[in-house]
Amino acid sequence: MLHPGDLTMSPEEALRIFVDRQGPDRPLAVAVSGGGDSIALLNLLAEARDCGRIPYLLAITVDHGLRTGSDAEARQVAAWCAELDVDHVTAKWQGRKPETGLQNAARLARYRLVRAVAIARGVDCVATAHTADDQIETVRMRGKRNPGRGLSGMAQSVLYRRDFWILRPLLSARRSDLRRYLENRGKRWIDDPSNEDRRFERVRIRQDMRDFEDDLADIEKSASERATDALETASVLETAVSAPHPALARVQIPPREQRAWLQALAFLLSIMGGRQHLPGAELMDRVAQFSKSNAKGRMTAGRCVIDKHRDLLYIYRENRNLPTVRLEPGESLIWDGRYEATNASPDQTAILYPTSDAEAKIELEPAFTKLPKGLLARAHRTSPTCRFAGESAAGSPSVEFMRILAPFDLFLPEFDMIIARTCAELFGAPDYPAPPLRH
């Protein structure tokens, strides 16, 4: 039940609601570091499993190898899982660790390893132990860097790499209540000393936290506003945007500036530029001013060219820093953040490179005479083509290209699902699966 006077609930109630929303037939993985939050989640899920509400539970621990004793901690987690009769796998982060951006690299490695282990066992969802406290800490950290959409907090479900779900059952539970739950059951956990190290921003925010309930109420309000904004942005994409060619987006300029229209434009710039993050507020202000101007012309923004003709904007990738890369037999790679290329040849290496000027003009100009002259040629020469190594002919039938939507294809929070699905239809990309949690 909800605690009196606040927006949180007990861990048991949060978990019950989560399991009800997921349904009784879906196997589940749980990420377990050994800390109090993840051990509480492990035990809560094991109880639900024992009651027949989860058909199969798999615990996964990632050993990052970043501090002495991490392997012993993983073995301790394995022992606790054995006591609960829960299958457990330890995945190790191998190879050299980066000297900068270590925390973000570790986070990406963690999700990559968890996904690989879970999918190998036929599981497409992992539950993580993020709490209401984590939610507020995350929002405060985001607010220092880029206030706006991030103030709605972490989503309860996030699609990772288009086929794997990250679920957060305990976003409405307090960290202190999870510790109380464990103590009442006589359970132990591992305290990570880094959680008390004020060199880390999250630790400083955690230790200095005040006004918890007010912050949580603000997050709830922001999340509701973001859901409304997503519906409005998707509507703009459906009614004001078209794609004459996968390399070109055409956008109608509204009579007066609209917040949803500018948000749709930000997503289009990320997609066409092959970038995971949306352009910043300062850049979008310049784009808005350019769009409102009377004269036609061009500007660059976020690796894209914005070409203005009367009441229309045409957006395409800037013809600069486009890669030429080798693709070995049987391998796949992401080209320029916009296409996934797969070499189906069993024995030939492919060379991927941007389409040449001559190829663009010969292949496309006659078929698109209603577009401004030369526009599609400029856009299409930023598309990928290929040949086998040692050959001059382009367009190997053994290499397949799939459209990538960069702001959605790595991490897609449920907040943005309607926008992502609208963009997938617009650009002919594969659709995204529906979230696994029922409303």
Image (tube, rainbow, N blue to C red):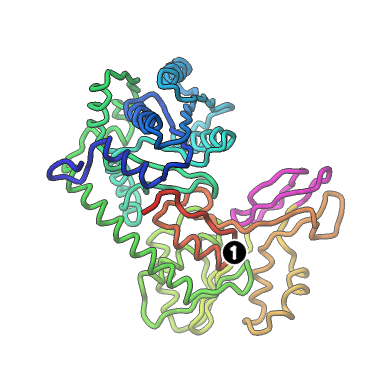
Residue at screen point 72% across, 79% down: 367
- x, y (%) of residue 366? 74, 80
Element at label 1: strand
Residue at screen point 50% across, 75% down: 251
Which residue is disc 1 drawn over?
A: 317
The outermost residue toward the left is: 5
Relative to residue 300, is residue 24 depicted above or below? above
Q: Write down the quadrant of residue 67 in the picture.
A: top left
Figure quadrant of the N terminus: top left
Figure quadrant of the C terminus: bottom left
Segment tinted magenta in the rendering: 322-351
Q: Residues within 10 Å of mark 1 (few under 14, many from 20)?
A: many
The outermost residue toward the right is: 391
Residue at screen point 35% across, 20% down: 190
- x, y (%) of residue 409? 53, 52
Foreground of the two, 262 or 283: 262
In this rendering, the count of numbered labels is 1
Residue 20 horizontal side relative to residue 100, left or right: left
Relative to residue 427, is residue 98 depicted above or below? above
Residue 198 in the magenta stretch? The answer is no
- Can residue 20 be seen here? The reply is yes
Relative to residue 232, is residue 367 depicted above or below? below
Residue at screen point 52% across, 41% down: 124
- x, y (%) of residue 350? 78, 49
Foreground of the two, 340 or 119: 119
- Can residue 70 be seen here? The reply is no
Residue 336 in the magenta stretch? The answer is yes
Residue 376 horizontal side relative to residue 184, left or right: right
Which amino acid lies under the numbered mark 1 shown in the image of this protein? Arg
- x, y (%) of residue 126? 46, 38
